[in-house]
């Protein structure tokens, strides 16, 4: 087994919010970073608002001899400091330009992972704890005679705790539990100055964007979101703390699961139209690409100096051909599940333009309500549903209204546009084309 099927989605989780538009180190939003999956040492948790552990629980159906593979992935913060030479000394600076290349002080990140492999039978017999350490590192690069760049990363310590419990009942199944804990300490940094630990200090010892990948040999996981009926009660009893397990990879082979610090659906995937990561949390590719195109040359120069990933984003967008940008405008993907790619045809007229379709006319179309044909100008009494709709609809129950149009959407549903008779703004709303919309079953016909 490999992690290939899950890596692209896991990478998107790992770098979610890593850098925010406009990708410059000087931007305020890039000075308060790391929003998802941050696990700090226990002695920093109470004062930083972050946590030191996560728990994942999920269900599986292991065969005899099944092996569970776990990969914990996270980013480790690495301070990149720029120094300018002054005689025999090096003085820290925010940025330095050497031979036309900009170097900026910033907090980078290094990908780390920890692997564990254990038989499910061993987990059923008892808890297995896997301690791990990531050693500190210091790297120095000279910038000729002008200065130098120093990259410093603190050492990390943590542990994975794995356990399994057989489910009650005749159907079998096993509940897996994976705890991830940061067991390092960063108290020394603050104690040396008699100060409280800051979030920036704690981040140097944190697991950032922490998530786990789980895989089973010759066995399957059960969906935590939509489990089979026999496992629904057991799935509801699973406890997930700052973790959200979903199936990833081939839907026909549910042997891999991603436990993420953000909410996802089962089998998430990267849109094939996306040309590369943008890192700016939850943004739309097209909008963010267009906004990046508007950066000035100076702003792009600063972004490129911020981080190699920012440089890659700006370079990719600068070189993007128009046809690739057009692909970001969107696609109606669900039609392909029905017709297949080869059968999709361009419509003769735009589907979104009512004037282009002579088969519909909101001014003359009608709908039958209580055996009465209702069209524009008819009067109806409102009986809106009081759940799953606008909460303010409760104030409209029983009111009389005038139908202004009968409309049908692309899915074939009918909607009746009305103005409320006792509303003093009804005439103004009619002029502006602002109506209230109801389904036919939410209306009662009023005899003329």
Image: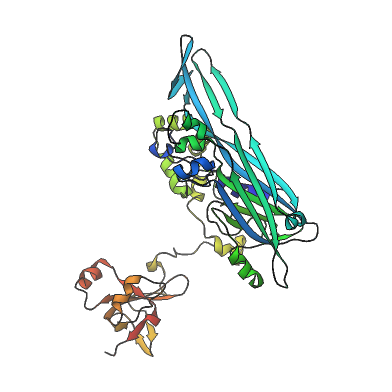
84 or 198, which is in the foreground?
A: 198
Residue 303 relative to residue 60: left or right: left
Residue 298 placement (x, y as % from top left): 40, 29
Q: Residue furthest top?
A: 87
Residue 367 placement (x, y as % from top left): 38, 82
Q: Residue furthest left?
A: 424
21 or 344, which is in the foreground?
A: 21
130 or 232, which is in the foreground?
A: 130
Q: Is residue 247 above or below residue 39?
A: below
Which residue lies at the image location 58% right of the left edge and 66% below the top edge? 236
Image quarter for residue 78?
A: top right
Image quarter for residue 382?
A: bottom left
366 or 271, which is in the foreground?
A: 271
Q: Is residue 358 above or below residue 65?
A: below
Is residue 157 visible in this depiction of the protein?
yes
Residue 353 placement (x, y as % from top left): 40, 65
Image coloring type: rainbow
Which residue lies at the image location 62% right of the left edge and 58% below the top edge? 57
Is residue 101 visible in this depiction of the protein?
no
Residue 264 placement (x, y as % from top left): 55, 56
Position of the C terminus by quadrant: bottom left
């Amino acid at each position: 087994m490999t992690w290939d099927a899950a890596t692209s989605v896991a990478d998107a989780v790992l770098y979610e919010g890593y850098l925010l538009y406009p990708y410059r180190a000087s931007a305020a939003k890039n000075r308060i970073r790391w929003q998802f999956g941050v696990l700090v040492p226990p002695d920093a948790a109470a004062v930083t608002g972050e946590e030191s552990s996560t728990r994942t629980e999920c269900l599986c159906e292991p065969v005899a001899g099944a092996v569970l593979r776990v990969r914990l992935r996270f980013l480790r913060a690495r301070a990149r400091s720029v120094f300018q030479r002054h005689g025999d000394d090096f003085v820290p600076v925010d940025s330095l330009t050497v031979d036309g290349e900009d170097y900026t002080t910033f907090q980078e990140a290094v990908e780390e992972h920890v692997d564990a492999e254990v038989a499910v039978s061993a987990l059923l017999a008892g808890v297995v704890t896997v301690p791990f350490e990531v050693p500190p590192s210091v790297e120095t690069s000279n910038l000729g005679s002008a200065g130098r760049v120093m990259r410093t990363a603190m050492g990390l310590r943590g542990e994975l705790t794995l356990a399994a419990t057989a489910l009650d009942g005749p159907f079998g199944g096993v509940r897996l539990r994976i705890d991830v804990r940061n067991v390092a300490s960063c108290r020394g940094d603050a104690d040396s100055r008699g100060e409280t630990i800051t979030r920036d200090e704690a981040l140097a010892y944190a697991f950032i964007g922490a998530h786990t990948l789980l895989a089973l040999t010759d066995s399957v996981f059960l969906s935590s979101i939509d489990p089979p009926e026999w496992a629904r009660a057991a799935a509801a009893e699973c406890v997930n703390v700052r973790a959200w397990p979903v199936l990833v990879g081939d839907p026909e082979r549910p042997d891999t699961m991603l436990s993420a610090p953000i909410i996802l659906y089962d089998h998430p995937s990267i849109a094939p139209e996306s040309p590369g990561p943008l890192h700016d949390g939850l943004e739309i590719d097209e909008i963010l690409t267009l906004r990046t195109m508007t950066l000035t040359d100076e702003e792009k120069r600063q972004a490129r100096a911020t981080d190699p990933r920012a440089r890659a984003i700006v370079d990719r967008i600068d070189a993007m051909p128009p046809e690739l940008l057009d692909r970001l405008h969107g696609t109606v993907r669900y039609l392909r599940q029905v017709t297949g790619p080869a059968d999709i045809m361009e419509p003769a007229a735009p589907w979104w333009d009512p004037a282009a379709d002579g088969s519909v006319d909101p001014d003359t179309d009608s709908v039958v309500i209580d055996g009465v044909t209702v069209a524009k100008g008819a009067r109806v009494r409102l009986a809106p549903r009081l759940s799953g709709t606008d909460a303010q609809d409760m104030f409209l129950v029983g009111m009389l209204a005038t139908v202004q149009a009968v409309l049908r959407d692309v899915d074939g549903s009918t909607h009746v546009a009305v103005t409320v008779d006792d509303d003093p703004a009804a005439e103004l709303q009619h002029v502006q084309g602002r109506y209230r919309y109801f389904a036919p079953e939410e209306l009662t016909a009023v005899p003329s």
